[in-house]
Amino acid sequence: MTKIKDISESLEEFAPLRLQENYDNAGLILGNPETEVNAILFCLDSTEDVIDEAIQKKCNLVIAHHPIIFAGLKKIQNQHYVEKTIRKAIKNDIAIYASHTNLDNVYLGVNNKIAEKLDLINTKILRAKEDDSTGAGLIGELKESLRESEFLKKVKKAMSVEVLRHSDFLERKIKKVALCGGAGSFLIKDAILANADAFITGDVKYHEFFEANSEIFLMDIGHYESEQFTIEIFHKVLSGKFPNIALQFSEVNTNPINYST
């Protein structure tokens, strides 16, 4: 009999909670650790629609990248999307677990998954935390140098994005690539100091694009887009250890941002 605490322990062995940032709320957010797990649904965001999907698929544990609760809830009135999600999960005995910045900060976590999609080699942590195996961002190399326009096409295809924002073309070849899933503009200077030719992340603000300073090709592919394959990490971590538990990927697109032409 597999319990929620067994799943939690496996995830935390891979991405220890001590590695999460101090503002974060990773771990078991809702549920009893002693509850037996029927089936698991992996998602990026545990929204109300995802809880509906879990109900339909008979999953009593949702594992998300983003915590549905960052700060304490003072009321649950079924008005805000967080309140609606938590209320529905409680009513249907569905537990919610999140592995967030702790998963960002491990070498084989979120950033390594992006590097895999881009076929980068010789990867290492961009800004080390405790040692070279933990920290923020990742840096690696393409197997062959690409023109900026070619690299754009590669990123779009690998990350399944149709639209992205970027700084000016520098008319240089791209070989060394730094990246950070989610909001990683705080690493722009680190990428430049590491002599990266390009830096990929999401949530780059207007003035932050100036920080490229004609020294690096800066690309904003979107927050959701950069982390969309995180669910594959959850599956890989748990599939070998719990072969008798049904593991399912959410089919709900939780990206709150839409693009119109």
Image: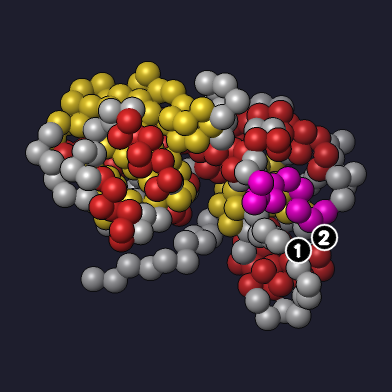
167 and 236: which is toward the camera: 167
Provide the residue designation for mark 2: 93
State the predominant SS element of the stretch in magenta: loop
Residue 202 in the image, given as x and y percentages of width and height: 39, 51
Marks 1,2: beta carbons within 8 A: no
Q: Position of residue 181 (x, y in %)?
A: 45, 44
User: Given the image, on which type of amino acid does mark 1 rest?
Assistant: Gly
How many circles with numbers are drawn on the protein?
A: 2
Q: Quadrant of the C terminus?
A: bottom left
Q: CA distance from mark 1 to mark 2?
A: 20 Å
Q: Which residues are magenta?
A: 22-31
Task: Specify whether 68 is left or right of 76.
Answer: left
- Compared with 60, 213 (above or below) is above
What residue appears at the point 33 percent right and 27 percent down from the top-left corner?
194
Disc on res. 72: 1
- Residue 35 can be seen, yes or no: yes
